Amino acid sequence: MDKVTILVVDDEERMRRLVADFLMKKGYSVMEASDGEEAVDLYLEHRDIALIILDVMMPKMDGWTAVKEIRQYSKVPIIMLTAKAGESDELQGFNLGVDEYVTKPFSPKVLVARVEAILRRTTGEDGGDVLEVAGITVDKTAHTVSANGQNVDLSFKEFELLCFFMENKGIALSREMILNHVWNYDYFGDARTIDTHVKKLRNKLGEAGNAIKTIWGMGYKLEE
């Protein structure tokens, strides 16, 4: 079986090598780029790249611009590395289609755990089901979504969040429970990560998004 390829993008060679070494020890194939331009070129040349780890601050083309370029062609999962942890930066990343946020300095082992969690979900190991609730249809194998008969374009994390809601329809889900199951690792963020994704998910689903109810002081619930 071919190795899964991950693209690591950072202008600091020491950081790239550190992350690459930990990934290769886990059996992944790693490609490296030192700026956004090189990252975009490599991805377009090697479309079998399964995941991208991308720094924000880089020469020639920064991480934000690189994400915009890549998102024109692909929904490949992207983990952003940043020295900033401000709300505006996180919101900008999520609006561009970033799937995960990791703030420097970070534990390489935790980063690898996040990579593994994403790849477990994108390989389709949990797939095979078609879910239908409240006018929303999700095909987990084809990774497609429709709401009231209209196709809906979701990011990887939005798709996983919707699946979790649909698999637990009628059940009140706390933010902690959502983080543990959808993000699938020990997450040290706060509630705004969940709230941001839910807001975007509702907007994309249109009227069907009203089925996702807010449970004040707790979390969310998907109702029929």
Image: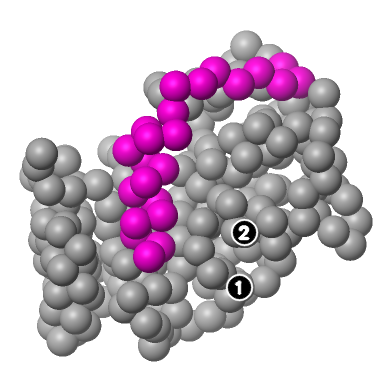
Residue at left offset 15%, top offset 86%: 14
Mark 1 Cα-neighbour bin, 10 Å: few <14, some 14–19, many ≥20: few
In the rendered image, which quarter is residue 44 located in? top left
- Label 2 is placed on what type of residue? Leu
User: Disc 2 or disc 1, which is closer to the eye?
Assistant: 2
Residue at left offset 34%, top offset 59%: 115
Residue at left offset 40%, top offset 63%: 114
Question: Viewed as shown, does residue 82 lie left or right of 164?
Answer: left
Regarding mark 2 in the picture, which secondary structure is present there? helix
Q: Return the x and y of residue 93 as percentages of the image width and height.
A: 48, 62
Q: Return the x and y of residue 193 as percentages of the image width and height.
A: 63, 62
Query: Would you say the residues marked 2 and 1 are in contact, meaning their CB atoms lie under 8 Å apart?
Result: yes
Question: Is-magenta flag for residue 132?
Answer: yes
Depth check, front residue: 186 or 65:
186
Which residue, given by chain and number where applicable, does mark 2 sit on? 179
In the rendered image, which quarter is residue 11 located in? bottom left
Depth check, front residue: 55 or 159:
159
For the question of whether residue 85 can be seen, the reply is: yes
Question: Viewed as shown, does residue 56 lie left or right of 147?
Answer: left
Q: Return the x and y of residue 103 as percentages of the image width and height.
A: 45, 79
Q: Residue lying furthest top in this view?
A: 149
Which residue, given by chain and number where applicable, does mark 1 sit on? 189
Residue at left offset 38%, top offset 35%: 125
Marks 2 and 1 sit apart, C-alpha to C-alpha, by 9 Å
| Quadrant the C terminus occupies | top right
Region of the chain picked out in magenta, as a range = 113-135
